[in-house]
Amino acid sequence: MGKYILKRILLMIPVILGVVILVFTLMQLSPGDPAEVILGPTATAEQIDALREEMGLNDPYIIQLGRYMSDVFLHLDFGTSYISNVSISAELVSRFPKTLIFAVSGMVLSLVIGIPLGVTAAVHQNSVVDYGSMALALIGTSLPGFWFALVLILVFSNRLGWLPAYGIGGIQYWILPIISTALAGVTTMARQMRSGMLEVIHSDYITMAKAKGVKQRSVIYKHALPNALIPVITVASMSFGTSLGGTLIAETIFAIPGIGVYIVNAVNNRDYPVVQGGVVVLAVTFSIIMLLCDLLIAAVDPRVKAQITGGKKKRGEKK
């Protein structure tokens, strides 16, 4: 198992390097001169040239890339903002917990609602409950996330006055943002759970358990559900990455000071170092989540576990 973990970590390294190189290259190709952004429209050509030389913007691309990668990976330094001249690393550290809480809460809500909904639909296949559950899932998938968030604000904040429309504070400030983020995850989990349960329910060992007189509840929750959850783990990790990226829109709508708002404001102001730092942090977080997902699947899926241990036995037999 230790070698498998090491292998997965090593495979994650080129992915992160590729993301950093790609983001840096795209920012280099973006229109606008960073020196002009910093100095403003009243700066003279001499002042702009002097600042470009001071910032190293006149250096060749490969030298700028090497310097940026060295700062990021060796010193965890993403530079300073062009607009505020504040350390980007410090801003990301202060904002990242809010974004992470946002994404994790949305994922937990998706699992809590989506899994029971999918199980119920599978157990009552081709019934009114099944069709109703899948219809709700289809409607939820079709609704744009930003539109659903605006509807929540109009209904529960403006009309009813139950919850605040924006900002950050107590638990009440997180309810609407988390619900809006969890919508897509709930529908995805429900559909995947239904598909997995239907596949498992028709397996031979489930039929055998029913023939032995095992109660329906035990068959579903003790025998079928654990096996049906294995593919859901992968879907959940992908959905978490989607919700992590989706916080850009939700944080902007609900004015939550997370990484999403930080990146959107940086894009509007052409603050390229902030965009680079925010995207890299989100990409690294997503890579770590996928690594944990692979390790969790290897721990709970007997087929993957057998492949790992089987490979060890074969190497031992050759010796």
Image (cartoon, helix red, strand yellow):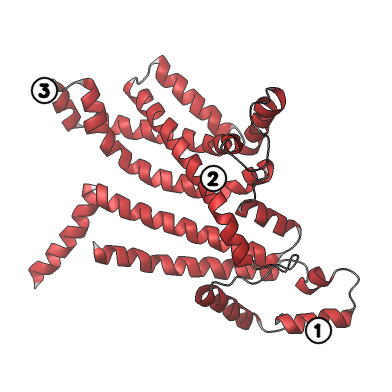
Q: CA distance from mark 1 to mark 3?
A: 83 Å
Q: Earlier in the sequence, mark 1 or mark 2?
A: 1
Q: Secondary structure at mark 2?
A: helix
Q: Which residue is mark 3?
A: 212
Q: CA distance from mark 1 to mark 2?
A: 43 Å
Q: Are marks 1 and 3 in contact (CB under 8 Å)?
A: no
The residue drawn where x is 54% and y is 30% is 140
Nearer to the camera, 104 or 244: 104
Residue 314 x %, y %: 13, 64
Residue 160 appears in which quarter of the rendering? top right
The circle on residue 102 is 2
- Within 10 Å of disc 2 (Cα), the crowding (few <14, some 14-19, many 20+) is many
Nearer to the camera, 300 or 165: 165
Q: Residue 305, can we see it? A: yes
Position of the C terminus by quadrant? bottom left
The residue drawn where x is 56% and y is 61% is 93
Residue 288 x %, y %: 43, 58
Residue 200 appears in which quarter of the rendering? top left
Residue 49 x %, y %: 82, 82
- Within 10 Å of disc 1 (Cα), the crowding (few <14, some 14-19, many 20+) is few
Label 1 is placed on what type of residue? Answer: Ala
